[in-house]
Image: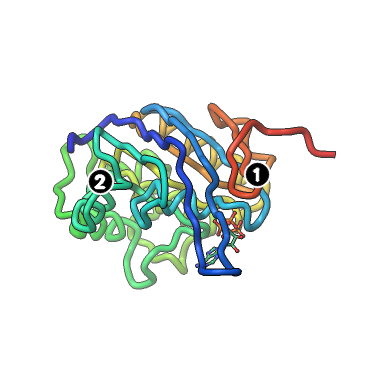
Amino acid sequence: MTRGSAALELAHVTLRLGDGDAQVTALDDVTLDVTPGELVAVLGPSGSGKSSLLAVAGGLTRPDEGSVRVGGVDLATASRRELARYRREQVGFVFQSGNLIPALTAVDQLRFALRIAGRRADAAHTPELLLERVGMSARAGHRPHQLSGGERQRVGIARALVTRPSVLLVDEPTAALDRARSREIVALLAQETHEFGVATVMVTHDHDVIGACDRVLEMVDGKLGQVHAHS
Ligand SMILES: Nc1ncnc2c1ncn2[C@@H]1O[C@H](COP(=O)(O)OP(=O)(O)OP(=O)(O)O)[C@@H](O)[C@H]1O
């Protein structure tokens, strides 16, 4: 699989979870193309399938039907080994509250991510330079408990990008932040998405932050579509 700029292409993806009467169609015929350098927001109520969408796009689970293509490989038919490799080499994840490792300083979070990925930073994307990009140089030696929620998210974004993924998957990045911080974080995600040419999907409940996104979609009962006005 080639590294770098690759689109994320989901076609007619269906994912069923649970068994028998308890079975739920978490994703129902979902089609989504995200181009390199594009930030797509996915809105939707709790239980609508947003986490399932990230799980399928991130190679954490295979769909029951449809295809999920990144750089010419179909994750729906990939082996477990190929999926693990895809997750390690092609995907960056950003979670709700940063999900940083408590014992590590900000710069070590990024070094550790590189080590896990079995990668070396190229000269233009060292951990130090990435932290500078997200405005965290002065806090590079701080551990998570010494950082604010917004600062932790900045480190989380830098950590996700240090391995130079093709696809960036972002789960409720502003859940723990106030309105001003939320807007800053999503503006940063947009900036880095464009700069790195990464295909980014951000799921969120937060209608307030979608102005910075290139495209906004809505998930309802496992179906992905255009946003409808809410009363
Ligand atoms: N392991 C499972 N077995 C059965 N059903 C499941 C399982 N995991 C999730 N579901 C169901 O699948 C549907 C989609 O869940 P999903 O977590 O993708 O929604 P979500 O939009 O991310 O919700 P939230 O915003 O609350 O995180 C929900 O109806 C949920 O109850």
Q: Quadrant for ligand 1?
A: bottom right
In front here: 39 or 155?
A: 39
Q: Amino acid at mark 2?
A: Thr
Q: Residue 224 location, x and y as percent?
A: 58, 39
> Is residue 111 in view?
no
Task: Report which residue position mark 1 lands on.
Answer: 180
Mark 1 residue type: Ala
Residue corresponding to mark 2 = 163
In this view, the residue in front, 11 or 157, is: 11
Quadrant of the image occupied by residue 80: bottom left
Which quadrant would residue 1 be assigned to in this image? top left
Establish if 199 lies above or below 131.
Answer: above
**The quadrant where residue 198 appears:** top left
Name, please, the residue furthest toward the bottom: 103
Mark yes or no: residue 196 visible.
yes
How many numbered marks are there? 2
Identity of the residue drawn at 22% across and 43% down:
126
Give left or right: position of 7 versus 204.
left
